[in-house]
Every structure is written in structure tokens, then in C-alpha cells.
Amino acid sequence: MTEILRFRSQEQGEALAFRFLADGTTDHAIDWSYRDLADRSGAVAAELAGMAGRRVVLAVDPGLHYVAALFGCMAADAVVVPSFPPAGRRASARFLAIVADCEPSVIIVSAWLAAEAEALAAQLPPAARRARWLLLDDGFFSQYEAATDLPAPRRRHLGHTGPALVQYTSGSTGEPKGIVLTQDNLISNCRVLEHSMGMEPDRVGCSWLPPYHDMGLMGTIILALHGGWPVVMLSPVHFVQQPCRWLNALTEYGVTISVAPNFALDLCLSTVTDEDLETLDLSALRQLYCGAEPVLASTLDRFRDRFAPCGYRESALIPCYGMAEATLFVSGKPGATMPYRTWLDRAALQRGIIEPVPPQAAGATEIVSCGTVAHGHEVVIADPQTGQRAEPGAVGEIWVSGPNVADGYFGRPELTAESFGVRILAAAGADGGRTYLRTGDAGFLMDGELFVTGRLKDMVIVAGRNLCPQDIEASVLAAQPGLRRAAAFSVRPDQGEEQLVVVAEFRRADALLVGVRDAVTAAVAAEHAVRLSDLYLGPPGTIATTTSGKVRRAATRQAYEEGTLKVLRPTLPSGGDAVRPGAHTAGELAQ
């Protein structure tokens, strides 16, 4: 990537590389050319001289200085460890866990954290306390002479196959784990994405995703530099505050390619007003990658209907599937085609059987494809218990092979052996030839397309049936407009039978809750033929999420069982009584 940045600065020196919307609006845009980026990355590399092969934690606020520090670390031949800045309790805990795990030589944070740095360092184990802290802001760069060129890359004894970056997982199913990525992994990911999306001379990107997350880092910043096209960036905080800021940026700069998880589309649907629609023009948008979490057909339909008057075309939507263990990209919809969908029998799917049915059939459920597998890669559907190929027409575990796949987890050889480099077993028990990554995701292949049905660890098993939590959550949210996020999981009180529980966040704290449980319970029973044992209603922030917004069901279940979930305290009409969020019956809700 350092060689590519040098090439861009020499051949496209004055061309726009990155534009950052400092306050989330187009009124305060800061532009850097490729030469600007090379100069500032060179300054960071100079400060990190001697750090070749050593780990550097990068926990800087989203923006241009983050991009400069990222490529500066690479120019110094250091191993970059992206991290969410330690702002707030949850983010600080994650930051400290990453630092303690990787034991870096240097920690780079934004200058505003100067007052907290000493207190944060004191919470680290002795081995991680030795790291040198660097505070990054405009003044940091002014301490050094601007580099006229990046330092020539030094040959490392492991070459392009040595560690270049340790990407920590989002932790949706457990504690974050560091994934060791090489320059070869990073370049491979760029190449297969470019093969999928094609080359366009007028491409302009836009992203509000956290640059510490694989989709925001590998799928936007690194990909854009590799391809030589400009990117408009805004902070995820500014997007969440006003989602229309993202759509305004698409309009103002004629953005042709962008990214957004399913929840972001839902957020736009619930916040963008009719007045906002009159100012939007999405006709330039040709590619909108949607991944990081299950893509729901209902969301795609509502987003299409809502924003079609603004020039949005459904053919631009690209459902995709990826994971940090595969650098990022595993599959995606190719070309300007319509997203591929299929209707399946829900009851059969819950038994792990793929049974296509007409859309009007009773019990039919619509599934959205995640497209075709990345060029030069292979996906097989395996039986997670036997390690053999799953039977045709059956759901199994998704196994991936190809140059995007990382070597393993940092400092975890046993876990690496369990997940990376496994082989498909033949019926006679002999190993196959190719090695694979076990993704932990359930899915199936149909008509050359990959369909993802959920996380194996998250699967809700009730009365011998495998229920996908995302499907239950979608039914819950559709049943009650006031709900903004849901987490479905099973519990086993006193080691008895598994029971279905849903924790949901209620937007309107002043709304009367009577009837909410009845509506949700009826929807879950009708669509999934299962009884809901408990519906816990809490305020926004009740459900644990990852940095990319994915629901952390295991953490939410733990808080539910420990009784530490946030409590919703609605303001009821005069004479009303308080409502216990975890009430089990409509009668209790009425009390």
C-alpha cells in the first residue's frame, strides 16, 4: 500500500484523494490531494522510525489525520492495530482490551485525550504499560518537516506475507479477537472487489462507517487508494445524529458508490422527512454496498419506495457478505442487476432444509442473496458437526478459501487451528486437498448465489427447531412501529427447556406500553409458530452492539440474565401507573 500511495502522489499528485466533512455537512469540507496525504503520512512514518515489525495501536478520531496515520504506520513498516478511540465506558473497555491483548510499542490517540492518557495507561497490565503514547492533531504534524516523498519501503524478512495489520473482530458473538492480515491479504481484497464492481473513470465514494471497522477501513479507505478514486468521509457520530447528512453528501458530490448496513437504511427511513426528500438527488448513485449484518427484503422494499422519487434505483443496491477473518469481501451482487431473492418454506428452513415455494404460499419467507463468490475464492457449505459437505438442499456452515483469508488470530494458536486451515472430510474420513476458514455463519448456495441465514452461535433452538434470531427480530420490529432495535435469544431457566426471549428498545419513552406485548407476541406466534416467553422493553442503548451497529446477542442475554439491562421509565397519562418492562402478560402490562 505504501508503494501505491507513492505512485498516486507522483502520477495524480494534485487530484483529490479524501474529503472530510468536519461537522458532517458540506459547508465545512477539508480536502487532501494524494500529495497532501503522502506528505503527512511521511511525517508520521518519520516519527515511527525504528518501529518496523512492531505493533502500533491507532485510536484516532475519524478524519484525514486518521488516514495519514494509517498509511504512515504502513510506511514505517509497523503493524497497524486499528481501534475505536477510548471515548465513553464501552469504547474505553474495548480499547483497553485490545491494547492489553496486542501489547503495542506505540499508541496513537487524538490530542483531546491527553488528559485521559495517564489514567488509561494505569489500567493496563505491566506488559502493555510500556507503550509510548503519541497525541495526533495539526500541531503534531507541524513538529516535523513535510516529507517530499514517503520513505522507501524496507524489505522485511517475511515480505508481503508478514503481518501488516491486526484487525480486531467486532465481538458480536464474543470477546474481540485480533486477526493478522498481510499486505497480500489487503491487496487481494482490493482486487476481488474491483473485479466485482468493475472500473469506472468517474467513481466517487462516500462513507460514514467507522474507519476501525473492516467495512470502513478495507472496504473504503484502502480500496479507494488502491483504485485511485476520491472518497468523501464523515464521522459515524454525525451520521447517527442526522442520517440525512449522508444522503446530502451523496447529493452534493454526485457520489457513485457508497456503503450502508441494513440498520442504516432503516435509520434513514425513520428520520428523513418529506421536506428532506425534496432536496435529495440520488441519481448518480450506481453502487450501494449493503453488508455487515443480514439484509432484509422488507427494508430494501421500503427504502426503494421511499427514495425512488429522489432518483434512487434498486439495481444500485448490492447485498454482500464478508468478515474480518477474510479481510472483508467474500461475496456480492455483480453488475447493475436487481438483487436476487427467493421464497422458501419457513418451517422447512427452520429444519435446515431449502424448499422453494411460490410467494403466495402459506408460511413463505423471502430471502435475499448475498451475490456470487469473490473471484479466485471458493465457498462450500459444510456440516458443522461432521466436517463433510452438507447434503444438497440443506443449510450448513459457510467455509471460505482463497487469498483474502487471513493466517489466523493474533496470539491464539488453538483458536486459529479450530477456525483456519480446516479441510473438508470425505465420507471415508480422508481429508480433501484445499484448506478453508470456518466462518461460523449458516447459509446455503443456490443458482450460483450465496445465501446467509444467520450465525450458528446465535441460532435459537426451541422445541427442536432452529430459529434465526434476525427473522424473529424483524417480525418484532414490524409489529410495533415504536420499537427501534431488537435482540432475540433463548434462555434455559433452571436448566429446563429453552425459552424464547426478546429484548427491544422503545423509541418513545412517553408512550403507553399497554398492548405492545400482545402485538409482538401475536406477530412472533403467527410468523414463526413459537411462543414468546418474555418481552423486555428498554430505552435506546439497552441492547449491546458492536462498533458497526450489529446486535451483540450474547452480551444482551448475559445482561438480561443478570438483571442489569436499562429500565424504561415511561411517562404515562394522568392517573397511569408505572409499567414493569419485563412483564409477562398483557394483564401485567396493564398494571
Image: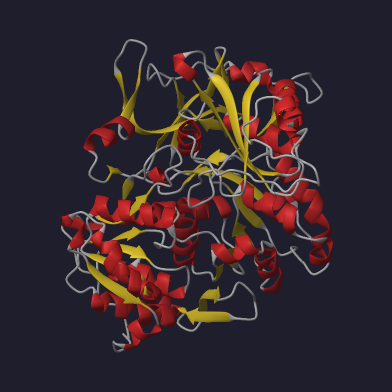
Determine whether, in the image, residue 429 is placed left or right of residue 33: left
* Residue 300 image position (x, y, % from top left): 71, 45
Q: Give the farthest residue toward the top.
A: 428
The quarter in which the N terminus is drawn is bottom left
The quarter in which the C terminus is drawn is top right
Point 28% across, 34% down: residue = 415
Observer-nearest residue: 589 or 500?
589
Point 69% across, 46% down: residue = 570
Determine whether, in the image, residue 187 is placed left or right of residue 500: left
Determine whether, in the image, residue 437 is placed left or right of residue 235: left
Observer-nearest residue: 193 or 556?
556
Q: Is residue 289 above or below residue 205?
A: above
* Residue 581 image position (x, y, % from top left): 63, 36
Q: Is residue 430 visible?
A: yes
Q: Is residue 181 visible?
A: no
Observer-nearest residue: 37 or 139?
139
Q: Is residue 12 above or below residue 198?
A: below
* Residue 524 image position (x, y, % from top left): 70, 25
